[in-house]
Image (spheres, grey):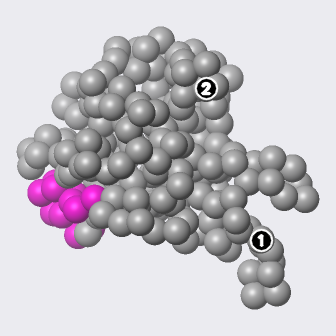
Amino acid sequence: MQQLFNLLDGSIRSNLRQIALSSIPGGGFYPLKQVPVIRLGDDGERGLDVCEWGFLPTWWKPSDKQPKRAAFQRQCFNARSETVDTKPTYRSAFKTRRCLLPAEKFEEKKHYFSFADQRPFAFAGLWETWHGDDGEIYTCTLLTTEPNEEVRSVGHHRMPVILQTEAEYARWLNPEIKERGPLDELMRPLADGSLEVEPIGTLF
């Protein structure tokens, strides 16, 4: 799934708090590029950081078969919510390194999906720190779930896990929650009819 998500101009307001994004380029964001994430700092406060989109676990090392980290990351743009707590790549981060990826819309199969009132939301994500010869690198992935009716209508079999309220953001980021039980209801598809669908115009 080659998700593209667009950052709001100015600041993420409403339930995501007022976090200035002036240092982050606007427009679309793509896998293997730098993307904005909201995560808890060491002080327990939310902060805006930048991560490379394409998860890289701490234990990954270059090998003859896979000398470049990007090859591994291409398999880790998204994490299936159904197995994220048990898959070796993600299970440690699921317990202690969850994050939010702020957005106002996403793209699948040449269609944009957004809320009718264009309100911001967040993708549920995970982040990780990897140490290599090129230094310390922060990477992330976003979680996916079964599609709702709108996403299914364009022929796609997965959709991002979308969080909408302060209560959902707080629960997802809560460092005291380390098992999937309290998070299960967050990792479900949006209700059918929740999203507006807009075909992406073709340039000739």
Residue drawn 64% across the image and 61% down it: 57
From the viewer's side, name the closer residue of 88 and 46: 88
Quadrant (top left/top right/bottom left/bottom right) for the N terminus: bottom left
| Within-10-Å neighbours for mark 1: few <14, some 14–19, many 20+ | some
Nearer to us in this view, 104 or 47: 47
Where does the magenta region start and end? 145-156
Which label is found at residue 61? Answer: 1
Give how far apart the Cα atoms at labels 2 and 1 are: 26 Å
Question: Is residue 92 a member of the stretch shown in magenta?
Answer: no
Position of 92 compared to 16: left or right?
A: right
Q: How many marks?
A: 2
Q: Is residue 194 depicted above or below 93 in this figure?
A: above
Q: Residue furthest bottom?
A: 65
Q: Tell which residue pokes out farthest to the top in this image.
A: 18
Q: Is residue 161 left or right of residue 54?
A: left
Instruction: Residue 108: name its quadrant.
Output: bottom left
The answer to which of 35 and 186 lies nearer the viewer is 186
What's under tag 2, amino acid-wise?
A: Gly
Q: Please give the label number shown on residue 41.
A: 2
Residue in the picture at 30% in, 63% down: 82
Q: Residue at x 81, y 47 (%)?
A: 136
Q: Residue 63: give x, y in percent of width and height.
A: 80, 81
Q: Is residue 113 visible?
A: no
Residue 91 percent coordinates (x, y): 48, 59
Q: Residue at x 69, y 48 (%)?
A: 129
Residue 85 lies left or right of residue 36; in this view the side is left
Question: Would you call the spot at circle 2 few (<14 residues within 10 Å), some (14-19), or many (20 or more)?
Answer: few
Q: Which mark is residue 185?
A: none
Front position in the image: 97 or 176: 176
First in sequence: mark 2 or mark 1?
2
Q: Amino acid at mark 1?
A: Lys
